[in-house]
Image: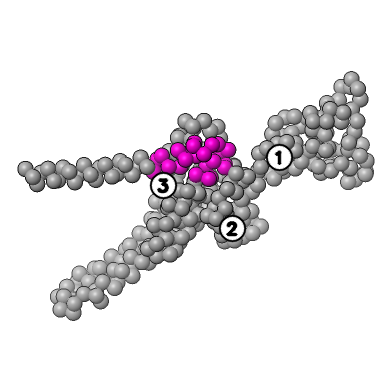
């Protein structure tokens, strides 16, 4: 939205008090009892535009340019920060640098979500989640392939000669695990992200949040930055999910502008219920098996 100068009609920059083209002052006094709209904060000054967020009339002293080019009043800009994430600036920074800077903020400074831009396209959010999942899946597949390849060399020589076919099958199983992790692992991660974000969004809605599913998907995807730790064999895939769960609490609270209680419920309730159901199922199977053996 462009704001014309009242004198020369050339576009002016929100926040400027003088026109860049003609040099005239933009702080125009309102005529007493006049029909011109006046500023909501400074009623003695004429309004130059309407805030795109709250709809209030604003003078040149109050107008500001929002991060997406919209015209907002100073109160809205202060009340609801809308800073872009490094991931949103990947065209200027480059994809790898944008991923790295976003991951550092998520893992080390998760409170930055409180002033981050809530909205983002679903495709952009899922692309970030995919890039965070790829290193972990590749390292996991490579680790399995190495383990399966080393197993024949650890077996006794007599056993190796008598089971050469099984040893060859074991090596091919390692290659198969690598292919599975590289080709299907990222797909599984994306499907899981979409489904888990949907479940979390239902819980958040019950907690009173009003923003849409795209905001939850963005928060869920950005909080997966700790999955990059999966590049560290054995340890990374154990630490990453727990770290991501903590980051998700900050992401839901910040992007949805909600309370800690609602954010905790949205981030932790679904995983806890899943663990209870899976653990209860395993326990029921074990108890049933023990009961049959006892009879």
* Residue at which label 1 appears: 77
Marks 2 and 3: CB-CB under 8 Å? no
Which residue lies at the image location 29% right of the left edge and 44% below the top edge?
Answer: 278
Residue closest to the far left? 295
Residue closest to the far front? 260
Which residue lies at the image location 21% right of the left edge and 42% below the top edge?
Answer: 284
Which residue lies at the image location 39% right of the left edge and 43% below the top edge?
Answer: 271
Q: Assign a secondary structure to mark 3.
A: helix
- Residue 218, x across and y down, in percent: 53, 45
Q: Residues within 10 Å of mark 2 (few under 14, many from 20)?
A: some
Report whether residue 126 is seen.
Answer: no
Specify start and end residues of the magenta stretch as a single range. Answer: 249-271
Label disc, if present, on residue 192 of the rendered structure: 3
Tell me which corner region of the image, top left, top right, bottom left or bottom right, holds residue 195: top left
The earlier-in-sequence mark between 1 and 3 is: 1
Distance from the alpha carbon under mark 2 to that under mark 1: 24 Å
The earlier-in-sequence mark between 2 and 3 is: 2
Tell me which corner region of the image, top left, top right, bottom left or bottom right, holds residue 139: bottom left
Q: Assign a secondary structure to mark 1.
A: helix
Q: In this image, 93 relative to 248: left or right?
A: right
Q: In this image, 278 relative to 221: left or right?
A: left
Q: Nearer the viewer, residue 42 or 181?
A: 42
Tell me which corner region of the image, top left, top right, bottom left or bottom right, holds residue 99: bottom right
- Residue 150, x across and y down, in percent: 29, 73
Report whether residue 55 is seen.
Answer: yes
* Residue at which label 2 appears: 101
Q: Assign a secondary structure to mark 2.
A: helix
């Amino acid at each position: 939205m462009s704001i014309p100068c009242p004198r020369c009609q050339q576009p002016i920059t929100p926040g400027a008090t003088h026109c860049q083209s003609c040099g005239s002052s933009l702080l125009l006094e309102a005529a007493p009892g006049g029909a011109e709209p006046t500023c909501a904060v400074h009623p003695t000054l004429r309004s130059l535009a309407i805030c795109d967020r709250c709809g209030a009339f604003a003078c040149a002293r109050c107008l500001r340019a929002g991060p997406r080019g919209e015209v907002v009043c100073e109160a809205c800009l202060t009340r609801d920060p809308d800073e872009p994430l490094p991931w949103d600036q990947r065209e200027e920074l480059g994809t790898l640098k944008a991923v790295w800077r976003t991951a550092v903020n998520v893992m080390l400074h998760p409170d930055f979500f409180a002033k981050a831009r809530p909205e983002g396209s679903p495709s952009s959010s899922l692309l970030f989640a995919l890039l965070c999942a790829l290193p972990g899946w590749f390292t996991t597949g490579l680790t399995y392939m190495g383990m399966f390849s080393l197993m024949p060399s650890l077996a006794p020589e007599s056993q190796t000669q008598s089971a050469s076919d099984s040893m060859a099958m074991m090596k091919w199983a390692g290659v198969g695990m690598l292919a599975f992790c590289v080709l299907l692992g990222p797909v599984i991660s994306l499907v899981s992200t979409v489904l888990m974000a949907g479940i979390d969004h239902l819980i958040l809605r019950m907690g009173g949040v009003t923003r849409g599913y795209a905001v939850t998907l963005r928060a869920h995807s950005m909080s997966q930055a700790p999955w990059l730790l999966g590049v560290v064999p054995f340890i990374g895939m154990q630490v990453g999910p727990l770290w991501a769960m903590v980051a998700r609490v900050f992401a839901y609270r910040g992007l949805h502008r909600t309370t800690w209680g609602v954010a905790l419920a949205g981030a932790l309730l679904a995983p806890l219920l899943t663990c209870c159901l899976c653990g209860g199922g395993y326990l029921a199977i074990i108890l049933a098996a023990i009961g049959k053996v006892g009879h």
